[in-house]
Image (cartoon, rainbow, N blue to C red):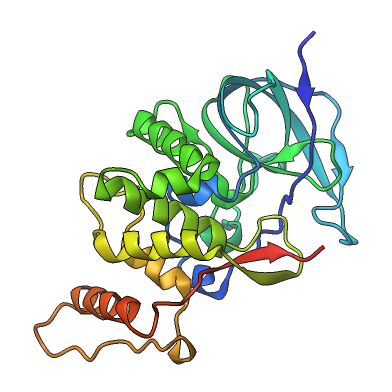
Amino acid sequence: MFRVLSLASVAALVLATPVEAKRVMRLFTPVEKLVRADVVAVGKVTALEKDTVTAAPAPGATDKLTYKIAVLKVETGLYGAATVTHVKVGFIPPAPVDPNAPPAPVRPGRGGFQQVNLTVGLEGLFYLTKHHSGEFYVISPILAPTEATADGFKDQVAMVKKGVEVLADPTKALKAEKADDRLFAANVLVTKYRTYPEGGGEVENVKVPADESKLILKALAEGNWKSDPKTPQAPNAYQSFGQLGLTDKDGWTFPAVKPGEDFIDKTKDAFTAWLAGAGKDYQIEKLVVKK
């Protein structure tokens, strides 16, 4: 007998902030997936259960969906699955294809993301969220697994492991010796704090402790604001800056950019100056579901 971890998540309904809604076609990075997931694991689909489960995709939803249940063997529990060997994962299987019917139009998920279809033998890096029923996990289209045969698979696993270490001890990560490591920690935390909870619900803004907020902002100011071609899956400081959503109420003004000047470089300079002046007492706020 194996131990099955059965908890809850949102299936077909995936909510995003307005900023995210404008960029849904961009594939999410491992960090963006990590902060949205309840469980992250390297594993293999070992079975599909015969019986399906009918359940509402979200609390209060009147329509119900029929989920096929896959059994995922956890080979390495990276986040939220350190003590389990198997988990149940619900998914919506594609409709049977009539070989005599004309090709049907493609109906992608939100923003062009295809619904995840799990098959026996599929191995990879899985990002799971809890179904609100408490009976199984689901994979939303934006958190599609990375197959073990994909290019950069090992690098993505390593990035998730590093991100988990940041979430476990933010202060330690923000005080790392190398500036790149401090920036990575800041990026993970800003992404975590400014991401709308995957499970939905009404949220409120709660200030991050002042000491931690200062360390995050300092790491952003000192970090690289442009993507490194060697690590395209890693977030950069400019992306995290954008998630802060600074306005004139925070004393922030975007710089005037002349022809030939680099907007990102100028914005970094303006951010550094803001942090030393009008933003010296600014505290980052995180989105928290109201209880």
Judge whether 117 appears above or below 263 on screen: above
Percent position of residue 37, x then y: 61, 45
Assign the N terminus to one quadrant of the image: top right
What is the quadrant of residue 217 in the picture? Answer: bottom left
**Vertical comparison of 225 with 262: above or below:** above
Q: Quadrant of residue 205?
A: bottom right
* Relative height, residue 288 to residue 188 (above, below): below
Coordinates of residue 32 in the picture (x, y in percent) = 49, 52
The residue shown at (54%, 40%) is 168
Q: Is residue 32 left or right of residue 232?
A: right
**Left or right of 181 in this view: 122:** right
The foreground one among 117 and 285 is: 285
Residue lying at 65% horizontally and 28% vertically, measured from the top left: 81
Q: Tell me: 115 left or right of 132.
A: left
Q: Nearer the viewer, residue 271 or 32?
A: 271
Viewer-closest of 26 and 109: 26
For the C terminus, give its image quadrant.
bottom right
Q: Report the side of 227 relative to 107 (left or right).
A: left
Please identify the residue farthest to the left as the structure is shown: 260
Q: Residue at x 51, y 66 (%)?
A: 210
Camera sees residue 114: no
Farthest top residue?
Answer: 1
Closer to the camera, 258 or 23?
258
How far across and down, in percent of the image, does residue 151 sit? 33, 33
Q: Is residue 249 visible?
A: yes
In the rendered image, residue 88, in percent from the top left (x then y), is placed at 74, 29
